[in-house]
Image (cartoon, helix red, strand yellow):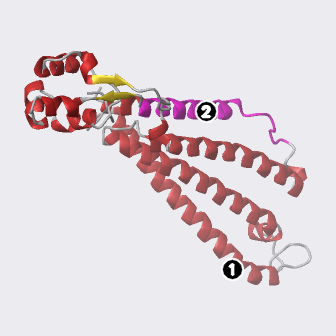
Amino acid sequence: MRTLGPGSIASLLKIAQDVAYAVLWASLVLVVFATAAGLLALPFLTGRLDGHGNIDGHASDISALVAHWPTLLGAAVSIVAYLAVLLIIIFRLRQVFATLILGDPFRPENVGRLRIVGLALIALELVGYVVRLALVWAIPERSKHLDFTVNLSGWFAILVVFVLAEVFREGARLRRDAELTI
Amino acid sequence: MPIRVNLDRMLVERRMSLTELADRVGVTIVNLSILKTGKARAVRFSTLDALCRELDCQPGDLLNFVPGPPDEPGEEETG
């Protein structure tokens, strides 16, 4: 299989990255708009909520959502943060990939980009724990099944990314040496 | 870099231009300039062979060791 060009692994990966980038942006915009719409509609819905949590005297799914709006807002903020971090990762990966397409991936800038990806992955792991703790605090009756064990695969992936960053650093140094070998 | 390249002096002594040497040795002027200005990180034996042949000299005539601190590897790349 070819390294670059049509039909290569790189071209397939580029398509996957472009799709992920578009889907993440669309999801982020959707969540932000839905949250904003929900916040705008909240004063109208809470005004119609009676003491039993029913809207206009009728029990409905919306009434349950309105009753738990702080939790929902927290969930929306967590989702936005999650999508934003994923976008940072994809954005940096696309930058790394652009250098690969140019045929020159071993650049010093890519070391920093891969480190940012690693740090973003660490942030995702840590935010995951914070969100789970927040859920236990906010809705303890529904959070008993939450898993607080260490995600070994996630931390292993982080290790791989940081090792790759160092490999890129050495690659950049070797490339520079090769360039200046007469 | 504690290794100094005496290409300048050798060219003056032989009244040869860098372009002419580049043509004779088969190395681009850009690369010879890198060598001349001491920015090169390494010299291939084949290049050294061609330079010595065309300049009628020994490798020691082209290269000098001047005591000084060595370059840190990767220093230039990462800033």
Quadrant of the rendered image containing residue B14? top left
User: Looking at the rendering, in which quadrant would you find the N terminus of chain A?
Assistant: top left
Q: Is residue A147 visible?
A: yes
Q: Relative to the observer, which residue lies in front, B25 or B59?
A: B59
Is A9 within the magenta?
A: no
Q: Chain of mark 2?
A: A
Q: Residue at x 54, y 48 (%)?
A: A89
Prevailing secondary structure of the magenta residues: helix
At label 1, the amino acid type is Leu
Q: Which residues are magenta?
A: A145-173
Mark 2, secondary structure of its residue = helix
Which residue is tagged 2? A157
Q: Residue at x 85, y 48 (%)?
A: A143
At label 2, the amino acid type is Ala
Q: Is A132 displayed left or right of A9 in the figure? A: right
Local crowd at mark 2 within 10 Å, few (<14), some, or many (≥20)?
Answer: some
Q: CA distance from mark 2 to mark 1?
A: 40 Å
Q: Chain of mark 1?
A: A
Q: Relative to the observer, which residue lies in front, B71 or A27?
A: B71
Which residue is tagged 1? A40
Mark 1, secondary structure of its residue = helix
Quadrant of the rendered image containing residue A13? top left
Q: Relative to the observer, which residue lies in front, B8 or A50?
A: B8
Q: Is A75 situated above or below A58?
A: above
Q: Earlier in the sequence, mark 2 or mark 1?
A: 1
Q: Is B25 displayed left or right of A35 in the figure? A: left
